[in-house]
Amino acid sequence: MNIEEEIKQTKFRNVQQKAILNILFTSNWIQSKQKDFFEPHGITGQQYNILRILRGQHPNRISATEIKNRMLDKNSDVSRLIDRLIVKDLVVKNRCPKDKRASDIVISEAGLDLLKKLDATINGLDLQLIGLSNEDAIALSGLLDKSRS
């Protein structure tokens, strides 16, 4: 379905406005589908993003500040998200030996196991959500990069 049908609007200020609204609408649609996917696993998309960041660092530790710098959603409350992952035993937080005011975060074995379980099905979700050929996905990604330049 095209954006005009989705939002029941046929007139736009210009093609740039239409493209921006299409990007925003599609982003929200993808986030909704991801929420439905992650919910049975007891995590959110933002928590999944943190777990992926930590797996990329594993076995090394990383600060909450560095996690926030790498997050897709820069407005995330990383401390709260990490606290929820700790309660679920998916990450471990320790005081930084160099700076007693800071903490280092590391993914737990349970966190690694959850990501391994999700890895088996997440590629299918990506394909289902984007619905584009590899070539079209590369072109779209390039255009989005270009728009942020």
Image (tube, rainbow, N blue to C red):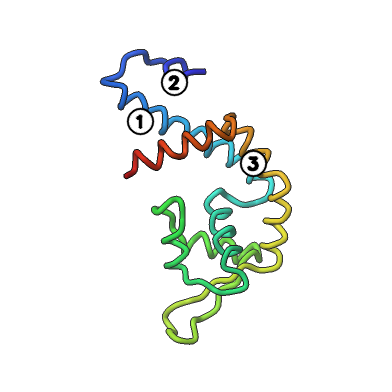
Q: Give the secondary structure at mark 1.
A: helix
Find residue 37 and name its label.
3
N-terminal-most mark, 3 or 2: 2
Q: Distance of mark 3 from mark 2, alpha carbons?
A: 24 Å
Report how many numbered discs are placed on residues in the image: 3
Q: Mark 2: which amino acid?
A: Ile
Residue bearing mark 2: 3
Is 66 drawn above or below residue 143 in the view shown?
Answer: below
Residue 77: image quadrant is: bottom left
Residue bearing mark 1: 20
Is 8 displayed left or right of 90 in the figure?
Answer: left
Asked if the residue under mark 2 is in contact with the one under mark 3, i.e. CB atoms within 8 Å, the reply is: no
Residue 20: image quadrant is: top left
Q: Distance of mark 3 from mark 1, alpha carbons?
A: 26 Å
| Mark 2 surroundings within 10 Å by alpha-carbon count, few (fewer than 14), some (14 through 19), many (20 or more) | some
Q: Give the secondary structure at mark 2.
A: helix
Q: Give the secondary structure at mark 3.
A: helix
Q: Mark 1: which amino acid?
A: Ile
Residue 19 in picture, x, y percent from top left: 37, 27
N-terminal-most mark, 3 or 1: 1
Residue 111: image quadrant is: bottom right
Q: Distance of mark 1 from mark 2, alpha carbons?
A: 11 Å
